[in-house]
Amino acid sequence: MEKFIAHRLTFKCRADGPIQMPPHKGSMFRGALFEALRSDFCLNKVLPSCVECPTAKVCPICKLVATVDHESQRGEEVPRPFSLQPDISATLRYEDGDTFTFGLTLFGSAASLYPYVVLAVQRMGELGLGKKWSAPGRFKLAEIWAINPLTMEAKLLFDEKDRLVQVPDIPIVHEQVLHHCRDMSGGGLGLEFLTPLRLVIDGQLVHQLTFISLIRRLLRRLTDLYRGFSDGVLDIDFPALLRQAESVRVSRDETRWLDLSSFSRRRELRTPIGGLVGEMEFEGDVQPFLPYLVWGHFTHVGKDATRGHGWYTTGNRE
């Protein structure tokens, strides 16, 4: 993971009139971001898919939210180079002047798309979000912050008062991850899934998580992101690591299944996107896996990371 980097961005927004949000906001933010990018930057809106678009190699939509790589070993549509950190507060109704935040983490070379993200968030505010039949949903972008949770650094990149946009320059890097892991040494491992974790193994949804199933999916996600958006491939003995993962056991499981669905206006189709939320603990030798689990804070794990799913925190069990 030595060449892997991430940039975590936090967007502070101020309601420009009433906004009515759904209980689980990740799909709303992802849909609004895609709509804004498509509205302003798509050259071929008549096409049903970005896979068919002749401008895919240079289009910011294809590079960010509808990634296309015709030479990829895993098919033309490859993992998107970002994860979404939705507002997980219980507040659903925002009145004029109220503020809310959400986050977006860019990986590797996708940092070059940062200007498009800023323009898209501003456009999101003009188009509105949430239940627009109940409230217009418009907002103003008030601030953008670059935040590194591992070093506790934070930098203001944009303030609506002066309108000048700065470049994010406090990246999350592997050396910081390793330093953070040293602080985690000792004891077992606790995880809290802040947003639904949705894993499918052998065609079946996982309702009872094991450590090896989590690590298998996490390593696949990190491998795909590293290959697609960093300069190189991961040099990891995956079979040996997975054999070690088999010895780590669940010691406490207080997760529950949360049923959710998402409606696509483009496809006129409702899709189930539910998953596991809550806390669990593991016992055994977790040390070899800590760097990957810490990176997973930022990449998320499982399906729908671009909706904010699979977002978790880690901690030692005393």
Image (cartoon, rainbow, N blue to C red):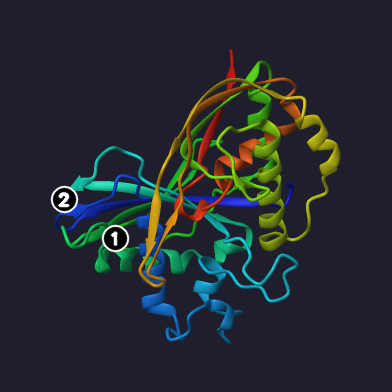
Task: Report the residue marked by disc 1.
Answer: 162
Q: Residue at x 61, y 73 (%)?
A: 68
Mark 2: amino acid: Gly
Q: Quadrant of the C terminus?
A: top right
Can residue 87 be spotted in the picture? yes
Bin the neighbour count of mark 1 within 10 Å (Cα to Cα): few under 14, some 14-19, many 20 and up: few
Q: Nearer the viewer, mark 2 or mark 1?
A: 2
Farthest residue to the top: give it: 318
Nearer the observer, 227 or 175: 227
Q: Which sits in the foreground, 178 or 84?
A: 84
Q: Indicate the quadrant where residue 229 lies.
A: bottom right
Q: Disc 2, disc 1: CB below 8 Å?
A: no
Residue 55, position as x, y percentages in the image: 56, 85
Q: Is residue 164 visible?
A: no
Please tell me whether residue 32 is drawn above or below residue 295 in the rendered image. below
- Residue 45, compared with residue 71, is above or below; it is below
Residue 90 position in % (x across, y down): 28, 37
Whole-number angstrom distance, CA of label 2 to CA of label 1: 19 Å
Look at 57% across and 61% down and name the residue there.
80
Of helix, strand and loop, which one carries label 1? loop
The residue type indicated by label 1 comes to: Asp
Judge whether 255 appears above or below 303 on screen.
Answer: above
Q: What residue lies at 73% left-to-right and 47% top-to-bottom? A: 1
Give the labeled residue for mark 2: 97
Of label 2 and label 1, which has the lower sequence position? 2
Mark 2 residue element: loop
Percent x, y of residue 269: 40, 65
**Is 8 on the left or on the right of 100, as rendered?**
right
Horizontal and vertical percent for residue 255?
A: 49, 29
